[in-house]
Image (cartoon, coloured by chain):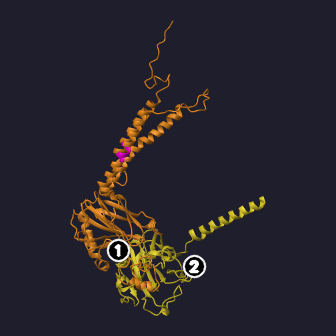
Chain colours: A orange, B yellow
Amino acid sequence: MATTTPAAPDSTEDPAGAGEPRHGLRIFLLWVVPAIAADLLLWFVYGPHMPPGGMSSSAASQQFDFKVMAVLATPVVLFVLIFSGYAFVTWRARKDDDSEHDGAPIRGHVRVQVAWITISSVLVLGLAGFGTYELIAPNGAGSGEGPSPVWNPTGARLTVAQMTAPWRPGHELVVQVIAQQWLFTFRYPQFGGVETPKLELPVDTPIQFDVTSLDVIHSFWAYQLGVKADANPQVDNVAYTTTRQTGTVNVRCAELCGLWHGAMYTDGKVVPAAAFEAWARSTQAQLASVTKTLPRFALIYTPNEIKGLNKLYYQAGLPGAGGGYYPAQYYPYEP
Amino acid sequence: MSLLARAVTLLVAFLAVTAGIVFVVVHILLAKPPTVDFTAGHVAGRPVDMTVMTDPVNDVSDHPDWVSYFVRSPQTGKWVHSTIWQLPAHTRINVTAYEFDTCDPLRNQVMGQVTGTIGGVMSVSGETIGVNGKAISLVNSDTTCGVAHTFTVPSLGINVPFAGVPYAVPLSKVCSLGPCAMSFLHTTTTFSFVTPGPGEYRWQCFIPCGLATVDGNGHAMSTIGFMTGYLDVVS
């Protein structure tokens, strides 16, 4: 009589499951390989090309954040897909299964609870710490910090006198972004306060953007620089970045601001420092006559640059127009 | 109420709402002024002459107190209430602008500079800023109150401030019926620019002249057909 040798047990078979495969292990094995492969591809292949690129310190910082988020999120997405696929293929109701009720409830499992709370706490606190570091270390991460920025690269806010002192290569460049319906202009206080619709910046230079508005709320979004700061009337909103690569910068308004909001965009450039200085000097000379007619450089501009004109307009019955000379209920200091 | 009456009421209500939506979409959302065509009969290489006027009032719309542009139709010679102008690409456009409105200061004086025109200048005839007939490249609207409106195409770098009529003139000399007759006090600005390749280029006035609106950029400033529109450049 022939004897049969029992087959070697499948390593993924649950020894306590009466022949039931170890589904958890199988799912893990199905998941871990593509998850690692996807993360490696994301980090090393696609990561360096993720938006907004590496044109500035804040952009590079945001790109790093995106890489971290992608590397964390992709395994989760893969797990959900693989688990769902595995469940769909493997588990189905048996013909003789007439059970219409859930199994016995699981009550209390200290190890699971401790593990759950511990892992969740580590993840949440770790991400909170990471996020805070990523906000502080790159000096606000390219976002507007308001009129009194705490995370500035020089340790102290520049005074207006420092902001208007002539610029030297390698030193911080101050660019005032002035938004109005529907145009951005850029004022360079270190170059005599010249104002132009063109944005040009030197590479490898710390930049201080002072963002303000002459009318409604806009938002200055220099995409490749990773800079986005609201432009509020009567507010100086400061954002920092350091340019690292030359190239083109797309500037858009990111706050719905009226009829031509969608057309409120322009292109800027990051160029070598020598080219920037040459451009700035020539622009300063070219626009000298119009610069003389501008108000003196200030952190914000009020609509009442001409003293008494508001009163004249108000008395003439022309509220709300003409350079923004508003009726008293909006700006009660005049008339 | 009977079943029939309820059904009829429901149907009537449905039709009324539908009609309302159609009216809003067709007459408000999709409404736009006619396109004034400067390409018909245009010979390549020849310049195009365009004449516009900016008026303190208009008598051709539901908003007679709104400031407005008008353009002279090259076909009929009549003034048309439109800010959508079809122009040939890569062509010199000679513009004559009659300005009948009173002056206002610019919100941003940088817009007082003439840019993007041939030679970077405009010529102004009128008595507001003392430059009769001269080619100038800058108007200081703060000190002279010399600008009434601008013609600005941001994407093309074109900006032309139109000298305005001073406030200190008898009201009878200020236009009160648009399109304005040439007998009313006005200034004349001439300039030229070259159109780029085909495309739609928005233009607007940068004097916040939307009276009685916060920031002055509502009403006429935010309505195509009055103080903003398109250059529809075609090949």
Query: Magenta stretch: residue B226 in it?
Result: no
At label 1, which amino acid type do we have? Answer: Tyr
Q: Which x, y percent locates residue A307?
A: 35, 83
**Near-viewer residue (B213 or B217):** B213
Question: To which quarter of the image does residue A196 belong?
Answer: bottom left
Query: Magenta stretch: residue A126 in it?
Result: yes
Mark in the foreground, 2 or 1: 1
Q: Give the range drawn in magenta.
A: A122-127
For residue A184, side relative to residue B227 (left or right): left
User: The residue marked by circle 1 belongs to what chain?
Assistant: A
Name which residue lies at 42% across and 32% down: A29
Please give the residue where the numbered disc 2 appears in the rendered image.
B62
Please give the residue where the numbered disc 1 appears in the rendered image.
A301
* Residue farthest along the top direction in this orientation: A1
Q: Which x, y percent locates residue B199?
A: 46, 67
Name which residue lies at 48% across and 79% down: B212
Residue A132, above or below B117: above
Q: Which x, y percent locates residue A297?
A: 29, 74
User: The residue marked by circle 2 belongs to what chain?
Assistant: B
Majority SS type along the magenta span = helix
